[in-house]
Image: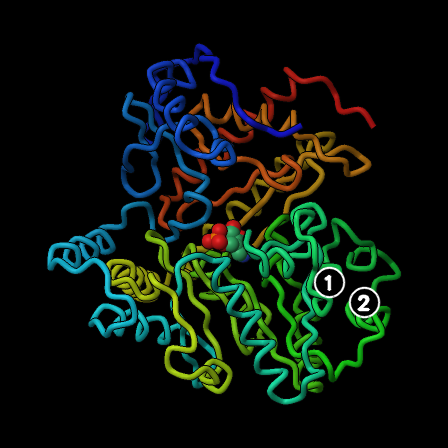
Amino acid sequence: MKPDFDFIARETEYVETAHRCIKTPIPVPESFPLFQEMEKYEIHANMGQPPVVWHHTEDGYKICDPYGNKWIDFSSAIFITNAGHGNPDIVDAIVKTAQKPMLASFLFATEERVEAAREYISVCPIPDAKVYMLSAGTEACEMALKVMRVNGVMKNPKKKVIVTMKDSFHGRTLGSQQLGGSAALSAWITSMDPDIIHAPYPTSFEHDWADPENPNFTEDGMFKSFTDTIDAAGIDYDDICGVFIESYHAPLCYPLPTSYAKRLRKFCDEHDIILGMDEIQIGGCRSGKFWCFMNNDIIPDLFTSAKGSSSSLPQSCLFGRRALLDVFEAQGLTSTHSGSPVCCAASAANIRFLRDNRMWEVAAEKGKIIDKRLHEIKAKYPDRVAYVGGIGMGWSIHFANAKKEPQPEFTREVLLRSMEMGLLFSAPNNHGASLRCMAPLTIPVEALEEGLDVFDAAIGKADKMMPKYTD
Ligand SMILES: Cc1ncc(COP(=O)(O)O)c(C=O)c1O
């Protein structure tokens, strides 16, 4: 069952704290005409989020509707607003650029694009790096694919195979969905690229061989899952041009094990393979380092970012070694909105904010609170919660039965009960059974703790209301 939301207003208990306020039935009856109009003009696929009208933020971590309600935000608008919603530095940069006025520039030079590129490179650990600024995350991943392929076949026409991970997420366009390796999401594609193959992502939730608590676990055994996939496809390692992997597995917020990351880096070096990583969900300090791969103490050859690297307007990036990105001649790559002045001004302000306030340290510290509290919740509701995982301030909790079968109805109840108490999540992912705790990194500790308490209480309410899972 898809966890979509109905428009039946439920009476709520009045809530008012320094961080939350619920004073109307939820969803708010006055909001229904707006949703009806949204559905009338926009595609149905856009209708999946919890029925809250976003009007403005207070203090960067509260979402306020036009009817007087306020939620502690655990969505960060799908993990965008690492620097806080409506961060004043970003707002100022946007306003100044808009008031010049200068709104569009294509690839013409502007001060804003050079400033953004300079700030991006200041936080990019790849030596001698360059950045290609784009609009959507999926566009950056498409470009990663292209850069890996083009560089590979320039060396040797057979060097064209790309290895990625099963059931990963790199976006919704043709190339990105093939990189993503989800059978369900790529069912619409009639001719799949035969030179993209998928290894299993090493998560202990899904695979015994990736579970350090399994007595038969070894680090070499875990990495064998990668080489076994390539061997089974009969591919010569030297014919691989690129490996592309999420630096943490987005569906489960599962960080890449360091031993695996290091073996991957070594494997790529030994076979002259470009190692690319997707930082779109977890990059921009959320992981407790500026980029999540820094937790693994490796440096990829290229990586994609978006969401938290702008904290606001649509801008994505492909970072990479100069030699890899500069193989295209002038005008050989274009994107209409690449380096849009207002997006660039916003992104530059965001990078400065994250870097100058050492927001990775903030995320690492607050992340300890989330880690502890979510594990307590798992221990408190062992029959409801099958998995808790994450890193820094990027966490997921998965509701499944003893056979690990997802429980979307229960998850939806938890989300609704949270919403009625003033805590906001984005729609569940992972077969509708995972809720992601992704507050803006700027959230005050007291509000974060209050949000986690509300979450605990919401699970308790759902537990009482809903029948036990069946196995
Ligand atoms: C890990 C990852 N890669 C790529 C994307 C695609 O980004 P976009 O939606 O901006 O195309 C997402 C979006 O959720 C993501 O989480």
Q: Position of residue 246 (x, y in %)?
A: 60, 61
User: Relative to 89, is 210 on the left or the right?
Assistant: right
Of residue 158 and residue 20, the one placed in the foreground of this image is 158
User: Relative to 155, is 287 on the left or the right?
Assistant: left
Residue topped by disc 2: 229
Q: Please name the amino acid that badge 1 sits on.
A: His
Residue 58 vertical placement versus 124 (above, below):
above
* Residue 131 seen in the figure: yes
Residue 320 vertical placement versus 344 (above, below):
below
Q: Position of residue 253 (x, y in %)?
A: 60, 51
Q: Position of residue 232 (x, y in %)?
A: 86, 69
Q: Position of residue 68 (x, y in %)?
A: 28, 22
Tell me, yes or no, whether the two marked residues, 1 and 2, touch with CB atoms within 8 Å: yes
**Quadrant of the snapshot with the C terminus:** top right
> How many marks are shown on the rendered structure?
2
Residue at the left extreme? 100
Mark 2 element type:
helix
Of residue 279 and residue 354, the one placed in the foreground of this image is 279
Residue at the bottom extreme? 155
Question: 10 Å neighbourhood of mark 1: few (<14), some, or many (≥20)?
Answer: many
Residue beneath the point at 45% across and 21% down: 420
Alpha carbons under labels 1 and 2: distance apart: 7 Å
Residue beneath the point at 72% across and 55% down: 203
* Sequence-wise first label, 1 or 2: 1
Of residue 148 and residue 385, the one placed in the foreground of this image is 148
Q: Please name the amino acid that badge 2 sits on.
A: Thr
Residue topped by disc 1: 198
Disc assigned to residue 73: none
Residue beneath the point at 31% across and 27% down: 65
Mark 1 element type:
strand
Residue at the front extreme? 190
Res 36 → quadrant: top left
